[in-house]
Amino acid sequence: MTAAVPRLEIKDLKRSYNGRPVVDGVSLRIMPGQVTCLLGPSGCGKSTTLRMIAGVEMQDSGTIHVDGALICDTVFRVPPERREIGLMFQDFALFPHLSVADNVGFGLKKGTRAEKRARIEELLDRVDLKRFIDGYPHQLSGGEQQRVALARALAPRPRIMLMDEPFSGLDNRLRDGIRDETLSILKEEDTAVLLVTHEPDEAMRMADEIALMRDGRIVMQGAPYNVYTRPVDRAAVAFFSDANLLRARVEGALADTPFGQFLAPGVPDGTDVDIVFRPQHLRIDFDRGGQGPRPTATDGTAARAVVERARFMGNESLVEFVLDHDNLRLKATVPNVFLPQPGSVMWLTVRRDKCFVFPVTGGRDA
Ligand SMILES: Nc1ncnc2c1ncn2[C@@H]1O[C@H](COP(=O)(O)OP(=O)(O)O)[C@@H](O)[C@H]1O
Ligand SMILES: [Mg+2]
């Protein structure tokens, strides 16, 4: 059996500006037909990574291979126009003076007139815009222009598609539909896709694999489910959703909290740990004559709290509490409508199996 060759492989890519590392050793492998999302906050180096792969920016070190062939290291460099890479950006600017057909055909260098026309028709059909083939960009809506831009990028059958926040210029209502449509077209074309986004929802929706980036490095990588449910640190939890935090000191591999003791195996005595969990895993119980629910193995001990405020968010309600024990603020989300009065007393428990325990390191916290 031969090992499958990745369509795109980047190894230890680095780039500094004015002595400051902006991309600091990024490695990725993407197979044909696979969508990888480079997800991270603004300024973490996503676009710089993409520009190096496209060839419009030169790396300080590291290599880029396409289908096993070197296309760029620090001495050898295939020029951008020969990399067979398609690009799509937020600001995708169609050529206003060219027809839709000519926009889509713009990057088609090879083939006869008839072959080019056939490819243009095929793609416009695919994005469901064939009726506009002789129209002009100004006659199209934002979403339709986006689909033309996608057809244009795909026309030369790129081996790789690089997309930099391509949907962020679209309004919310359009966005989900266009994302899904784009995804199915990309899958049919069997290109390898690297999609840059700062929106976790977009990454969860589009990606086969998410590479979570921070300060120029990939901090974790995997299927969306794994990245969400097995975060590497507190910031990785907080990047995807609101997060609640309990801080406690470990004694005898146990951390004492208002919700009872948490196991902290392998953590030395005297170390502080962050116990992190998402608002949907805080459970609410009612006050029964000054008593909460009994402790259980899965939910630990209940802690008494007072409702600070409650808001209806559409498909869930967000309730904010203040714990009696130490005035700690915690958030809970509850499906549908649950709007208790501020000042109401309730008892809270935490789903033990949904908590993440991280030793507090000396480093910067998000
Ligand atoms: N040409 C450049 N010169 C100097 N600094 C740059 C240049 N391009 C990007 N940067 C800086 O590098 C960092 C990462 O930028 P970028 O890759 O665009 O991040 P992202 O796409 O994740 O928002 C930012 O701090 C940005 O200001
Ligand atoms: Mg960017």
Image: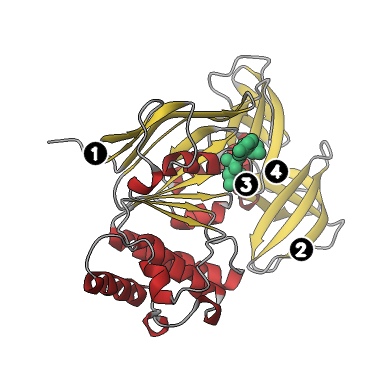
The earlier-in-sequence mark between 2 and 1 is: 1
The residue under the point 45% across, 38% down is: 221
Numbered disc 3: secondary structure: loop
* Above or below for 36 versus 343: above
Amino acid under disc 1: Val
Numbered disc 4: secondary structure: loop
- Quadrant hosting residue 173: bottom right
* Above or below for 220 versus 342: above
The earlier-in-sequence mark between 1 and 3 is: 1
Q: Is mark 4 within 8 Å of ligand 1?
A: no
Amino acid under disc 2: Arg
Residue 188 percent coordinates (x, y): 29, 63
Q: Give the quarter the ligand 1 occupies.
A: top right
Residue 142 percent coordinates (x, y): 56, 73
Q: Which residue is mark 2?
A: 311
Residue 11 percent coordinates (x, y): 39, 30
Q: Which residue is mark 3?
A: 278
Q: CA distance from mark 1 to mark 3?
A: 38 Å
The earlier-in-sequence mark between 4 and 3 is: 3
Q: Which residue is mark 4?
A: 302
Asked if residue 278 lies left or right of residue 312, the reply is left
Label 2 neighbour load within 10 Å: few <14, some 14-19, many 20+: some
The residue under the point 54% across, 54% down is: 165
Q: Which residue is mark 1?
A: 5
- Quadrant hosting residue 114: bottom left
Which residue extends farthest left? Answer: 1
The residue under the point 63% across, 40% down is: 43
Amino acid under disc 4: Ala
